[in-house]
Image (spheres, rainbow, N blue to C red):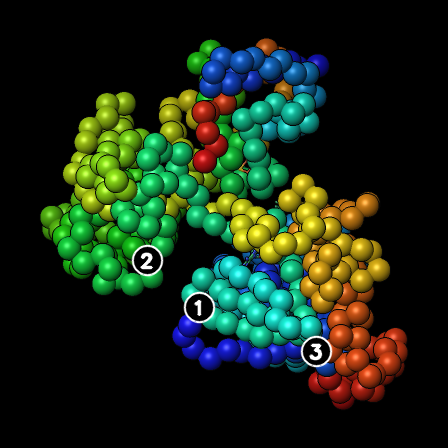
Amino acid sequence: MTGDVIKTDAVIIGAGPVALFAIFELGLLDIKAHVIDILDKPGGQCAELYPEKPIYDIPALLVVSGQELTDRLLQQIKPFNPVFHLQQRVDELEARGEDGFALKTDTGTQFETRIVIIAAGGGSFTPKRPPLKRIEEMEGKSVFYSVRRIEDFRDRTIVIAGGGDSALDWALALQGVAKRVTLVHRREEFRAAPDSVNKMRALVDAGEMDFIIGQVMELHGDAGQLTSAGIRGKDGETSRLDCDTLLPFFGLTMKLGPVADWGLNLNENKILVDTEKFETSQQRIFAIGDINSYPGKLKLILSGFHEAALMARQAYHYVYPDARYVLQYTTTSTSLQKKLGVR
Amino acid sequence: MPRITYIEHDGTRHEVEAEAGMTVMEAAVKNSVPGIEAECGGACSCATCHVYVADQWRAATGQPEEMEEDMLDFAFDVRETSRLSCQIKVTDELDGLVVHTPEKQF
Ligand SMILES: Cc1cc2nc3c(=O)[nH]c(=O)nc-3n(C[C@H](O)[C@H](O)[C@H](O)COP(=O)(O)OP(=O)(O)OC[C@H]3O[C@@H](n4cnc5c(N)ncnc54)[C@H](O)[C@@H]3O)c2cc1C
Ligand code: FES
């Protein structure tokens, strides 16, 4: 147990478009939110999977790209100063007494909150695991999908697989610390910042790093300890390369993850909610956006926005039990306009 | 209507009727063909719709464009015949197309 516990009214799990709009709806009702996402940026699927693709069914916007929608939402919630905790996955969620919850992330950040809003979409974005034999038993010992502390990799003989920015950035960062870094990628071209590619090539030319065109197809070793990797070259032949560490970087996929372990009623891996308050089987825990399930559910951004508004009304009752909820229009309400900073 | 055959890793064949204009991925998903996940729904941003095009169909299906080639970096066991099935448009000329699905889509 390290660090201070962050005490707040609301924690939102996930920072996709639906979470972002929930910040707005909660903000209008004076509920401040902390937002947690495993990604390094807000926007969920829109920002991660299709930042440049057009969306045509956001009301009143003829067309907007995934990234532009995210940017506009961020602009809209600015007055409410949400606190983002990125690159962290919420692992634990437990009831704490009658009217609160304790949350903990994989990096150890802890929260105490009165309500929880799960806006986890299709699940948390997780690094793809190459379907190689023995890889699971090697994870955490010889196989890593991220680097938390460079120093942990000192004097290791490392194979880095992949051709994107993560592969190149880590190859460059670990070169010099590791005993040897070998980059393995299936082709000569990289989909990465040209500057990193040039740096990598210069190191290879200087004999300080290796680059092999090929694909890692086999892992050898035992008891979770990698001793060599079978690399299939362009000619189709597989040859072995001695190494003790593999870092595969093949992008991200969405996995439901810890959400399934929190004792909430699920239906086909989605969290069951009512359609009045979008509350789960546990009072004070809400689920909105792609992660929830109810009769007639449509996995659309627009539906998520609606769910956020109704959720916020009930959240208000929990956070301000003595106050009465009154519907106000942003057009005419002086108090809402003050909160939005337009008055 | 063009017919497409998907052959699984273990040899199981699935023959489906596709419509010209849809993609080879969409035809698979619509007919519940296993082995094609298509997590991103055809946005060429997940590489979980990876297939191997049968040799005799490679000329007809053509070569991947740059964006697809980049995305193939995120697929497993990529070969000369690899394509992302969401990037192959079904046409009448592709009637009879045969593609193989990989053992695992990652
Ligand atoms: C290619 C494509 C095109 C689409 N086009 C449209 C369209 O035109 N119109 C439309 O309405 N919808 C469209 N959608 C669907 C739309 O993107 C989703 O409905 C929307 O993103 C759902 O938003 P969300 O906030 O519920 O979840 P998401 O966007 O999935 O975000 C959830 C976030 O939660 C995070 N998370 C999950 N669990 C945890 C955890 N335990 N700890 C930390 N973080 C966690 C994830 O990392 C993720 O960032 C499209 C989707 C795709 C893939
Ligand atoms: S469906 Fe995602 S890349 Fe083809």
Which mark is on residue A147? 2
| Residue A308 showing in the rendered view | no
* Residue B1 in the image, given as x and y percentages of width and height: 70, 14
Q: Nearer the viewer, mark 2 or mark 1?
A: 1
Q: Of the two numbered discs 2 and 3 on the same chain, state the one appearing first in sequence.
A: 3
Examine the rendered structure and indicate whether residue A280 appears above or below residue A210: below
Looking at the rendered image, the quarter that the N terminus of chain A falls into is bottom left
Q: Of the two numbered discs 3 and 1 on the same chain, state the one appearing first in sequence.
A: 3
Q: Amino acid at mark 2?
A: Val
Q: Secondary structure at mark 3?
A: loop
Examine the rendered structure and indicate whether residue B11 appears above or below residue B68: above
Check the residue under mark 1 and report the chain it is in: A
* Residue B33 in the image, given as x and y percentages of width and height: 61, 23
Tell me: is circle 3 under 8 Å from ligand 1.
no
Tell me: is circle 2 under 8 Å from ligand 1.
no
The answer for how far apart the CA atoms under marks 3 and 1 are is 24 Å
Q: Secondary structure at mark 2?
A: loop
Q: Amino acid at mark 1?
A: Gly
Quadrant position of residue A99: bottom right
* Residue B32 in the image, given as x and y percentages of width and height: 65, 25
Residue at image mark 1: A108
User: Which residue is drawn at the image coordinates 34% and 32% (left, top)?
Assistant: A133
Residue A10 horizontal side relative to residue B101, left or right: right
User: Which residue is drawn at the image coordinates 32% and 57% (left, top)?
Assistant: A147
Residue at image mark 3: A31
Residue placed most toward the observer, A2 or A334: A2
